[in-house]
Amino acid sequence: THRNTIPSRSISRSGALQRRLLVAICFSFLNRCSGSTMSHACQTSVKLNNGNQMPMFGLGVFKADPGQSTYSAVLWALKSGYRHIDTAAYYRNEADVGKAIHDSGIPREQIFVTTKLWTGFGPPIDYNGTLAALKSSLSLLRLQYVDMYLIHSPNDKPNRLEQWRALEAASKAGLAKNIGVSNYGIHHLQELEKVATILPATNQIELHPWLTREKLVAYCQSKGIVLTAYSPLAKARKMSDPALLAVAQKYGRTPAQILIRWCMERGYVTIPKSTKEARIKENMDVSFDMDPADVKAMSSWNSNMLTGWDPTVNQ
């Protein structure tokens, strides 16, 4: 049988081009940073549907090892200017996040803290269990309240409306300044809307140029629900993509900075994860504007590429 093949020299040239682009991007980034203090987008915020403000950029700590790794990452981030930290009960690092916040010396009211009720798998959690879980998280975080409390997924179908009722109670009691959901699809949100007295302030889902979820995004925006993008860097699976490298070279930025800026240009809160001090600082240097044509072009890269789980499609 005949197979189409690509000459090895073509592959070699393609790889060489990508390497040259990466080198050019790195030199541009280093030259820019060496001459001045890095600007960042940590003070940029978005207005939620309840009138409160939420920082559009923050540090995610998913898969940051509990202990020193998480503690150092959060402390580095806060010292660098971050004012939004996103954790969850499932990550098992809330205590380390809380210790770093405490040790940072930054006034509590200046830091936006998000955590989540774990509902992915395991025993069902009812109304009282939800309130108990939140109080446990607050204890680990050493906080009197969180700025955002999310239902981590819609997977506990029998109890998810009771869980939301508990979040509404927590909001009214001042234990959570804002409440929202994560990994909810349109049908989950429609179910919730029928009984909710408070609409979710945000829906945290995986979003990046290769997973744009246009219908879900449009629905959330029509309801005033802010999108929070997790895995905005697509778990680094596309960092050598030629189209991404070309955009990065155009702006003299790293591929990661371009992906973060794309999210912000689209109006999404974004929470890239890193436990490396240099990367944490690099990720925040995204105070630049992108040509709308480039943002639109990047949005056309969608291939429905998931890098993790997808409860949005569950019943």
Image: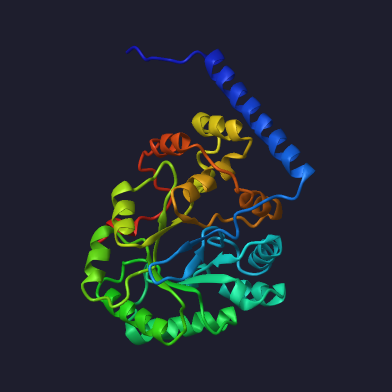
At 61% across and 76% down in the image, what residue appears?
Answer: 98
Above or below: residue 275 compared with residue 166: above
At 37% across and 73% down in the image, what residue appears?
Answer: 122
Res 219 quadrant in image: bottom left
The image position of residue 313, as x and y in percent, is 28, 56
Q: Closer to the camera, 179 or 205?
A: 179
At 52% across and 40% down in the image, what residue appears?
Answer: 290
Location of the N terminus by quadrant is top left
The image position of residue 7, as x and y in percent, is 50, 13
- Residue 109 visible? The answer is yes
Give the residue furthest to the right.
35
Res 140 quadrant in image: bottom right
Q: Is residue 283 left or right of residue 149?
A: right
- Residue 92 visible? The answer is no
The image position of residue 44, as x and y in percent, is 56, 58
Q: Is residue 184 left or right of residue 275?
A: left
Res 229 quadrant in image: bottom left
At 54% across and 19% down in the image, what residue appears?
Answer: 11
Above or below: residue 164 compared with residue 209: below
Q: Is residue 32 left or right of residue 126?
A: right
